Amino acid sequence: MKIRLTYLALFFSLITTAAFAQMAAEKETFSRYMFDQVHIQGKTNVNDFHMEYREDDFCQVPANFDEANSVIEIEIPADQITADSKMMLQDFLKLIQAQKYPTIDIQIDSQSIAFNAANGYDEKTIGVSMNGITRQFTCKTYSDACFGDHWCLTGELTIKLTDFNIDPPNKFLGLVKVKDEIFISFRILFS
């Protein structure tokens, strides 16, 4: 009886592994993507502030995505960012000149998106455009199969306001000072 259970467990394990391997192989190609969530965190000398952006719909991957030098560009409409504090959000939107530059753009090179090593840690170069300026940042990313037939690409990066010609503001006669570093974490779903 014990031998039969062991064989049954081994058989189930092989079937499960084969199914996940087939799913992973299928997920190496994708046709849609969605910026599932973006968290922006900053600090002042008094407290922390948090902002968030989420998309609801998938976008089509560009037809030329397999060609060299192609990118996925994700636009974050500044007016769709939410925050714990409305006052902090209004200050942030003023800071990045949202009326003049209504989106924050993220550019990811097609060569940087590969899902052949699930649960793999990688470093990628990601472009960020804000306040009319584009800068390249090295970003820690992780890829993994998730939500059935999707791949998740999650990442974390640190930017400085001064990289975008933004002086960290002071409020209340200098009593509250925003720190230069902003921490961004994100998750992109590919299908």
Image (tube, grey):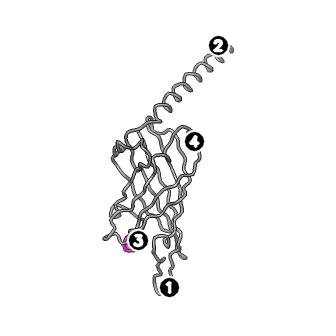
Label 4, residues with CA under 10 Å away: few <14, some 14-19, many ≥20: some
Bounds of the magenta span? Answer: 86-95
Picture layout, residue 66 above or below residue 95: above
Q: Residues within 10 Å of mark 1 (few under 14, many from 20)?
A: few
Q: CA distance from mark 2 to mark 3?
A: 64 Å
Q: CA distance from mark 2 to mark 1?
A: 74 Å
Q: Earlier in the sequence, mark 4 or mark 3?
A: 3
Kind of residue indicated by mark 3: Phe
Residue 119 - label = 4
Mark earlier in primary sequence (1, 4): 4
Identify the residue under disc 1. 174
Task: Look at 59% across and 24% down and name the residue there.
Answer: 13
Viewer-side label of 2, 3: 3
Percent from the top left, x then y, of residue 59? 34, 46
Image quarter of the N terminus: top right
Residue matched to label 3: 92
For the residue marked with disc 4, what is the amino acid? Asn
